């Protein structure tokens, strides 16, 4: 859970439930830190999308410790809210800022 705090705003013990021996981790009422995810998202999202906010009611992860190679990791997301802005190809100022940000 400690590694997740880099990508989640305001991650506290109150919104994390971990049962490590059962292979279960649950996060409730979280917002993703988009600045921390910026490098991961470059090239994944269409260049015309400007991601403003991603919040999740809950995220549950189940790791099959008994047979990790035979059973998949299971991730369940509930109540995902995404705020985006779509830029047109004529929004030259925004596109130029995105291009320069990707080359840094």
Image: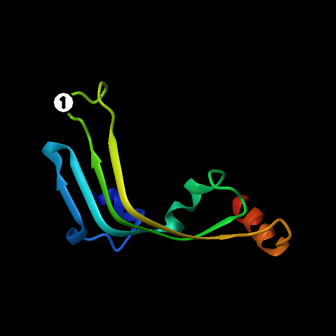
Q: Is residue 18 left or right of residue 61?
A: left
Residue 72 lies in quadrant: top left
Q: Is residue 14 above or below residue 44?
A: below
Quarter placement of the N terminus:
bottom left
Residue 42 is situated, as x and y percent measured from the top left of the image, at 63, 55
Q: Nearer the viewer, residue 20 or 51?
A: 51
Q: Circle 1 sits on which residue?
A: 66
Considering depth in this image, is 88 or 66 the residue closer to the camera?
88
- Residue at the spot x=21%, y=69% of the render? 13
Residue furthest to the top in view is: 70
Residue positioned 81% across, 68% down in the render:
96
Q: Which residue occupies 77% across, 72% down? A: 94
Q: Is residue 85 left or right of residue 90?
A: left
Residue neighbourhood size for the residue with mark 1, other residues' Cα within 10 Å, grouped as few (<14), some (14–19), many (≥20): few
Q: Quadrant of the C terminus?
A: bottom right
Instruction: Please provide percent x and percent y for residue 33.
Output: 46, 68
Q: Quick check: 103 above or below 20? A: below
Q: How is the image coloured?
A: rainbow
Q: Quick one: 58 or 65, which is closer to the camera?
A: 58
């Amino acid at each position: 859970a400690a590694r997740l705090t880099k990508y989640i705003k305001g991650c506290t013990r109150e919104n994390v439930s971990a049962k490590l021996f059962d292979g279960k981790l649950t996060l409730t009422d979280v917002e993703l830190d988009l600045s921390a995810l910026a490098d991961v998202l470059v090239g994944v999202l269409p260049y015309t999308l400007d991601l403003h906010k991603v919040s999740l009611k809950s995220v549950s992860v189940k790791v099959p410790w008994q047979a990790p190679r035979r059973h998949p990791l299971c991730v369940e997301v509930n109540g995902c809210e995404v705020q985006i802005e779509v830029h047109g190809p004529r929004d030259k100022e925004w596109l130029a800022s995105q291009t320069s940000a990707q080359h840094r």
